[in-house]
Image: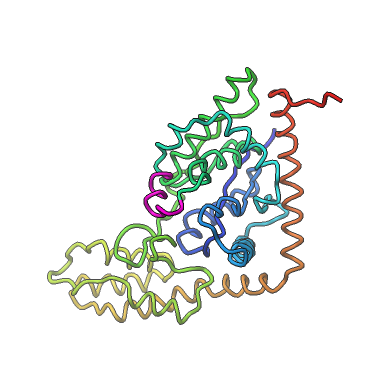
Amino acid sequence: MNKPTVLSGIRPTGYLHLGNYFGAVQNFIRMQDDFNCFFFIADIHSLTTHPTPENLQSGVKQVLAEYLACGIDPEKATIFIQSDVPEISELYAFLNMNAYLGELERTTSFKDKARQQPDNVNAGLLTYPVLMAADILIHKADFVPVGKDQEQNLEMARKFAKRFNRIYKKEIFPIPRPYTFGGGDMIKVPGLDGSGKMGKSEGNAINLYEEPKSIRKKVMRAVTDSGPTEMNQQKPEAIENLFTLMDIVSTPDTVAHFDGLYNKCEIRYGDLKKLLAEDIIAYTSPIRERIIEILEDDTYLAKVAKMGAEKARESAVKTLQEVKDVIGFRKLF
């Protein structure tokens, strides 16, 4: 029996952070044996924000090294760079012919990006859901892990797959489904700004590649309040967030110690933050050291990228040929 196919991508515009690691990457590591996994670095997607060539190249290399350092195994999963698989761009062009202006303009991601960068509302932003659909459909993915911000784009991919199958009267594409890691397997890692989740766009994240000095500085700036005024009072969100981070990286005894101090109105947030910072450093340091080691090994990175491209293209070429056949692109001479 064939393993179900799972696909996930990340843009090379920053670093993986604790939220990525606990929210998805640890689950990806566990999935490698039971699913046919494709993990890609979405460098074409990143062009919607016009990165410099230097930033684009360094970002791709950084994310590739971080995936590997976290435990994604290129022998078990397919790790590839989006632009190394030209079939994706060709399928993107075909799918664009059956994507309509009105439905693309109504997507939340387009409207949000248009507000964020009003001087750069390019066609790539408008057709972002089509390229995402091409990423998914080129490998006939059964499942796509998505967060709330990408649910609508996955729904668009499902729509494009159904539309293509209907227009050409053939079930070329399976209909991809969201994968949520069974709910309880996902850890929501809070940010340092007192609310919400950790994310690079919110500026409240601690990166896996972060230097100890920077981690200490960020944690000491984390939002707190003036302290509890009543015994055993409920913690406000900002304080609960700090305890959630401590639950993730510290020992149960440490968490219990500070929880007890809070409940007795004796807590000193400075002491809590100092220990939390050191525990985060202790947790991330082995990963950071592995990232640095891999970044220095261009031969290994090139080997992984080449192997990933070959495996990804093997799947993509087959799908694209089916698509071209059903559309009617056949050699006449």
Nearer to the camera, 220 or 184: 220
* Vertical side of 283 occupied by 25: above or below: above
Q: Residue drawn 66% across and 74% down? A: 293
View extreme (right): residue = 333
Residue 269 or residue 96, whichever sits in front: 96
Residue appearing at x 48%, y 80% in the figure: 212
Where, quadrant-wise, is the N terminus in this rendering? top right
Left or right relative to 15: residue 262: left
Q: Which residues are magenta?
A: 109-120
Q: Quadrant of the C terminus?
A: top right
Residue 205 image point, x, y percent: 42, 66
Would you identify the image quadrant in which residue 242 lies?
Answer: bottom left
**In this rendering, is residue 316 above or below 122?**
above
Percent across and percent down for residue 329 are 74, 26
Query: Residue at image x 62%, y 61%?
Result: 60
Where is residue 186 shown, x and y percent of the image?
Answer: 45, 51
Point out the residue furthest to the top here: 169
State the predominant SS element of the stretch in magenta.
helix
